[in-house]
Amino acid sequence: MPHALMQKVLKEYRARFEKVSAGKKAVPDDSKLGIRSKLGGEPDWCQGSEYPRCSGCGSPMSFVAQIDSMEHFDEHNPNAIDWRKGQEYMFGDVGMIYVFFCYDCLETQSVFQCG
């Protein structure tokens, strides 16, 4: 198989989800790069609001999750990896992937922003 057609398989991590109490935020300090991943709520945009519309019905899509560049090297981050040691979960310059879903059309979209 030609290299261009091969999928990169990333290291596997387990995610542990905890319900957040009403009035609290899953990411209380969005300056702590590398530990900002979450499900639900509102996106913690890196560069400004960028809600997508469904390509099927044209309606605004529902925010599902954000996936942080979790290997960002900082002492507060338990998954920190020095960039010289082969980071796999560094999206651009400490970027974030935002995932959206249309409950009517069952379509997904993602948005990428760099920090």
Image: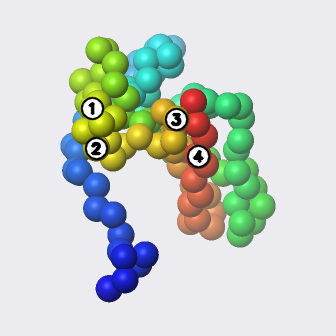
- Name the residue beneath numbered marker 1: 81
Say which residue appears at 32% left-offset and 85% top-offset.
1
Image: 89 above or below 8: above
Q: Which of the two residues, 69 or 65, is positioned nearer the viewer here?
A: 69
Q: CA distance from mark 4 to mark 2?
A: 21 Å
Say which residue appears at 27% left-offset and 32% top-offset.
81
Q: Is residue 31 visible?
A: yes
Q: Amino acid at mark 3?
A: Asp
Kind of element beneath mark 2: loop
Which numbered disc, 2 or 1, marks the residue that appears first in the sequence?
1
> Residue 12's mark?
none
Furthest residue in direction bottom, as rendered: 1
Q: Is residue 42 visible?
A: no
**In this picture, residue 1 sits left or right of residue 44:** left
Q: Amino acid at mark 4?
A: Phe
Kind of element beneath mark 1: loop
Q: CA distance from mark 4 to mark 1?
A: 21 Å
Kind of element beneath mark 4: strand
